[in-house]
Image (spheres, grey):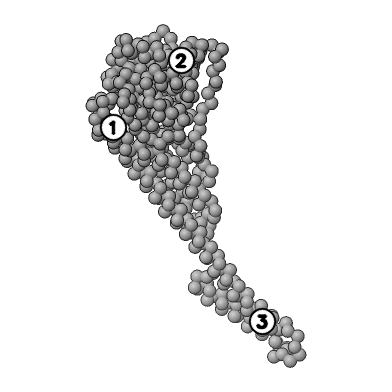
Amino acid sequence: MSMIRDLRAVVRPSSRVSLRKDSGTTSYDTTRDPATPSAVVDCAVYRDGARVPSAGPLSPQEAMRQVRRDGGFVWIGLHEPTEEEFAGIAGEFGLHPLAVEDAVQAHQRPKLERYDDSLFTVFKTIHYVEHDRLTANSEVVETGEVMCFTGRDFFITVRHGGQGSLRALRHRLQDDPELLAKGPSAVLHAIADHVVDGYIAVAHAVQDDIDEVETEVFSPGRKGGVSRGVDSARIYQLKREVLEFKRAVAPLLRPMQLLSERPMRLIDPDIQKYFRDVADHLARVQEQVMGFDELLNSILQANLAQASVAQNEDMRKITAWAAIIAVPTMVCGVYGMNFEHMPELHWRYGYPVIMGITAAICLGIHRTLKRNGWL
């Protein structure tokens, strides 16, 4: 499955600084600060659980200078940055080159990596694609990625894909200053919880699709007991989408367990307790997804078995009718031979008698085969 990506306009050095208030995001330009990337969605300083107001859009460098001078932490949100756009931020915050490469390239497996002064976490976001009816080509889920750099006084998110916007999450956290005062680890927990909540919603929607397919496969009213060539393709497509879902959920369980169980310098002890709840929810979703996979395997095998049974019944019917037709064919073949001396050849009642005997034999065979379930 291919990830759906937003198209982002390329900002040229000669363009002017703009602030897009209608969408709630800030757009930067290199004429304002050569080190400021245009991929920045939002950049803010938080102190004592509240967002520090600013006269205009802050660059990551300006925000970090404020933090080092007055305390607090900076939260920077980026969307699909290029290597050039991310290079300035990586240098300013001392991010590890391997983590920076993963964040720019995307298509990473969910994971947690610890470096000297930061944590690098990768989440796969899952979005359910609405559809009127599941077909053999339906896209059920689409994926995105959120990479998080957690430091002592900074938190950086790098988002890939058209889904998984964190704007609403940021606003919700800003409405809870007591939690936000815990620092970057509180933001990391909020994102993990947000991603796993998305998994739960998608799991419920996928369950409805599986129930629909299961009902159709085992519906007693279908002609011939099976919908030939349709259900198998739909089941297989749904199985592929569930596999994509499983690739997002399963690898994330170990990182969440580490965050909830192992003490880490960058994770507030009070926040670590909340990771246990996230890990528990994630474990339940993983069980659901594994169950989906097994159930779809059973449905697919049952559908193929039904198709095989239907084909066998068709062959039995064809064979039965061939046996019935063989009787008049044999009789007509015998009397079609041009011999002069044949039994009852010149008898006045020979024709009706032979036809009656033939019909009686055919009816007898038909009754026997029908009683045995062949017709």
Q: Earlier in the sequence, mark 3 or mark 1?
A: 1
Q: CA distance from mark 1 to mark 2?
A: 33 Å
Closer to us: mark 1 or mark 2?
A: 2
Which residue matches tag 1? 259
Where does the image place residue 33, in percent across and percent down from the top left? Answer: 47, 12
Which residue matches tag 2? 35
Q: Amino acid at mark 2?
A: Ala
Query: Residue 342: in sight, yes or no?
Result: yes
Q: Is residue 274 above or below residue 68?
A: below
In-image side of 59 versus 325 (left or right): left
In-image side of 170 versus 232 (left or right): left
**Label 3: few (<14), some or many (≥20) within 10 Å?**
some
Q: Earlier in the sequence, mark 2 or mark 3?
A: 2
Which residue matches tag 3? 331
Q: CA distance from mark 3 to mark 1?
A: 86 Å
Quadrant of residue 355 in the image? Answer: bottom right
Q: CA distance from mark 2 to mark 3?
A: 98 Å
Q: Secondary structure at mark 3?
A: helix
Where does the image place residue 336, in percent across and percent down from the top left? Answer: 72, 82
Closer to us: mark 2 or mark 3?
A: 2
Label of residue 191 in the image? none
**Furthest-top residue in this view:** 55
Closer to us: mark 3 or mark 1?
A: 1
**Tag 3 near tag 1, CB within 8 Å:** no
Q: Amino acid at mark 1?
A: Leu
**Label 2: few (<14), some or many (≥20) within 10 Å?**
some
Where does the image place residue 40, in percent across and percent down from the top left? Answer: 45, 19
